[in-house]
Image (cartoon, rainbow, N blue to C red):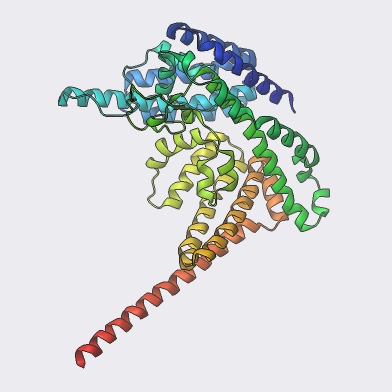
C-alpha cells in the first residue's frame, strides 16, 4: 500500500471509535467538535491547500445570499469552474494540491451544489406556505436557512470528509438534532458493515501484488497471448473493486458509529437523499432503524446484477443519487442513452481531466444502447428458459464491459488506455456495435412481420365480408 493509502486507512480506522464518542455530545458541542476535527484533518493532510475548499465554500455562500433563486445553477457553475482552476493551478505558478485536497474538493463540490438546491427549495416552499396557509408537504426539506457557521460546519464535518459518502445538509442537521443518539443502533450494524473488510483488503493486496497495473504499460505485456491480455483486465477490475469495497465499507462504518444517516425503516430512505416519506412511528411498536441514507456500495448487486445500467446504481450510490437528481434531469436530451451519456460526461469531469475517465465513462452509453437493443429484439422473443440463458450471457458481458472500462479509469492517459484496448482489439466496443446492429435488423424484421400479419388480417376480413 502507498503512504497516501495508509493515511486514508488511518483516518477511516480512527473515525469509527471516535464516532461512538460523538453520540454523547449535545447538538452545539457535536457541531463544533465535528467541525474542529474536520479542520484538523484537512490542515494536517492538505496544509495551505485547504484554502481551495475555503474559497469554494465562501463562494457558494455568497451566491446563495445574493441570489437564492438561481443558486443551484450558479453554484454548479462556480464549483465546477473552481474544479477546473484547482486542477490547473500549476499553470498559474501555484503548487500542485495534494491527493487529500483533491478528495476533499470533490466531496465539497457535491455538498455545495446540493446545499444550493436545498436552500432554493426551502425558500420556494416557504412562499407556498405563506400563500396557501398550509404547511409544506415536502419530505426531507429544510426547516431553516443555514447560517455561514452552519454551512462551514457541514462542509468540514469530519465524517467522510475525504472518503465520503456524500450526504445532504438535511441529513447533517438531523444528525445534530437526534434526541437520544446513544439509544440508536450502532455496534451491530457497524460490525455487520466491517465483517467483509479484512477479506476485501487481503484480496486487494494479494491480487495486486501478482497482477500490477504497471505491467500493462510494458512492451513485454504485448508478448503474451490474447487470452492472457484479455484476462488481465478482469484481475485489474477485481483489484479495483476490492480497494473501493474496503474503503467505502469502512467509511460507512464511520457514519454508523456516529449515528449519521440513521432513520426509521418506515421512512424508506435512499442513499444520498435520505427519507422519501413522512413517517410517524406507532408508539406501541418498537422502531427499527437503518443506515441506507449513507450506504455507498452494494457489493453483491454490483457484482451480480445483470445490466450495465443497474451496475451504476449499486456503485458509489450516494454520488449516483446526486447525479440523478441534479444532472440527469437537466440534460439537454430526451433519449435515455443520450441523457446517460451527458450524465457520464459530467461524472467524468467531476472525477478529473484525464482522458481515460472520458474514454471509460462515454463507453457506458454505448453499452446501454447495445443491451437495450438486444433486450427489445432478442430477449423479448424468448421463453422463460431462453430468457434465463440470455440473462446469464448478459451478466457475463456486463462484467467484461466494466473490466474493459476500468482500464481507462486506472490507466488515465489516452495513449495507455488505447494501447491496452487495441491489444485486445477493442473487443467490447465491437461487441456493443454488433449488438446494436443486430437489434436494428431484428427490429426491422419484427416490424415487417407485424405489417404482414396486419395485412393478412385485413385480407381475411375482406374475404369474410365478400362471402
Residue 65, x across and y down, in percent: 34, 18
Where does the N terminus fall, quadrant-wise?
Answer: top right
Q: Is residue 223 above or below residue 9?
A: below
Residue reaching furthest to the bottom: 467
Residue reaching furthest to the left: 132
Residue reaching furthest to the front: 284
Horizontal side of residue 425 vs 218, given as left or right: left
Q: Is residue 146 above or below residue 71?
A: above
Is residue 103 in view from this perspective? no
Nearest the eye: 367 or 198: 198
Identify the image quadrant of residue 99.
Answer: top right
Nearest the eye: 379 or 438: 379
**Residue occupying image coordinates x 45% and y 7%:** 26
Residue 2, x across and y down, in percent: 74, 27
Identify the image quadrant of residue 104.
Answer: top right
Q: Is residue 105 above or below residue 410?
A: above
Identify the image quadrant of residue 70.
Answer: top left
Horizontal side of residue 409 vs 131, given as left or right: right
Amino acid at each position: 500500500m502507498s503512504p497516501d493509502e495508509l493515511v486514508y486507512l488511518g483516518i477511516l480506522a480512527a473515525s469509527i471509535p471516535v464516532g461512538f464518542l460523538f453520540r454523547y455530545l449535545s447538538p452545539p458541542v457535536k457541531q463544533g467538535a465535528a467541525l474542529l476535527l474536520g479542520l484538523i484533518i484537512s490542515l494536517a493532510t492538505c496544509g495551505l491547500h485547504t484554502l481551495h475548499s475555503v474559497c469554494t465554500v465562501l463562494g457558494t455562500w455568497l451566491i446563495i445570499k445574493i441570489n437564492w433563486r438561481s443558486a443551484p445553477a450558479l453554484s454548479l457553475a462556480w464549483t465546477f469552474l473552481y474544479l477546473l482552476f484547482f486542477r490547473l493551478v500549476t499553470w498559474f505558478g501555484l503548487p500542485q494540491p495534494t491527493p487529500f485536497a483533491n478528495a476533499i474538493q470533490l466531496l465539497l463540490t457535491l455538498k455545495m451544489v446540493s446545499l444550493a438546491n436545498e436552500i432554493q427549495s426551502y425558500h420556494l416552499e416557504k412562499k407556498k406556505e405563506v400563500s396557501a396557509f398550509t404547511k409544506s408537504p415536502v419530505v426531507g426539506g429544510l426547516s431553516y436557512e443555514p447560517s455561514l457557521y452552519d454551512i462551514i460546519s457541514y462542509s468540514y464535518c469530519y465524517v467522510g470528509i475525504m472518503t465520503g459518502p456524500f450526504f445532504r445538509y438535511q441529513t447533517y442537521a438531523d444528525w445534530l438534532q437526534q434526541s437520544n443518539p446513544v439509544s440508536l443502533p450502532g455496534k451491530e450494524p457497524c460490525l455487520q458493515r466491517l465483517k467483509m473488510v479484512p477479506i476485501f483488503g487481503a484480496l486487494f493486496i494479494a491480487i495486486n501484488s501478482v497482477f500490477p497495473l504497471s505491467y500493462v504499460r510494458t512492451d513485454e505485456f504485448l508478448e503474451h497471448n490474447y487470452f492472457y491480455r484479455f484476462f488481465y483486465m478482469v484481475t485489474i477490475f477485481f483489484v479495483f473493486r476490492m480497494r473501493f469495497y474496503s474503503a467505502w465499507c469502512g467509511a460507512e462504518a464511520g457514519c454508523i458509529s456516529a449515528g449519521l444517516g440513521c432513520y426509521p425503516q418506515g421512512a424508506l430512505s435512499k442513499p444520498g437523499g435520505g427519507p422519501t416519506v413522512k413517517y410517524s412511528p406507532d408508539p406501541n411498536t418498537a422502531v427499527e432503524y437503518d443506515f441506507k441514507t449513507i450506504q455507498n456500495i452494494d457489493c453483491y448487486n454490483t457484482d451480480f446484477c445483470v445490466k450495465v445500467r443497474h451496475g451504476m446504481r449499486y456503485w458509489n450510490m450516494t454520488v449516483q443519487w446526486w447525479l440523478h437528481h441534479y444532472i440527469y434531469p437537466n440534460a439537454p436530451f430526451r433519449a435515455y442513452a443520450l441523457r446517460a451519456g451527458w450524465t457520464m460526461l459530467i461524472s467524468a469531469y467531476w472525477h478529473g481531466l484525464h482522458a481515460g475517465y472520458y474514454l471509460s465513462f462515454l463507453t457506458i452509453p454505448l453499452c446501454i444502447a447495445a443491451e437495450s437493443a438486444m433486450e427489445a429484439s432478442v430477449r423479448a422473443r424468448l421463453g422463460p428458459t431462453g430468457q434465463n440463458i440470455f440473462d446469464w450471457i448478459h451478466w457475463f458481458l456486463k462484467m467484461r464491459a466494466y473490466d474493459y472500462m476500468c482500464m481507462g479509469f486506472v490507466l488515465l492517459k489516452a495513449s495507455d488506455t488505447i494501447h491496452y484496448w487495441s491489444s485486445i482489439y477493442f473487443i467490447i466496443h465491437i461487441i456493443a456495435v454488433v449488438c446494436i446492429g443486430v437489434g436494428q435488423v431484428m427490429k426491422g424484421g419484427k416490424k415487417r412481420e407485424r405489417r404482414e400479419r396486419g395485412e393478412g388480417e385485413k385480407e381475411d376480413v375482406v374475404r369474410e365480408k365478400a362471402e
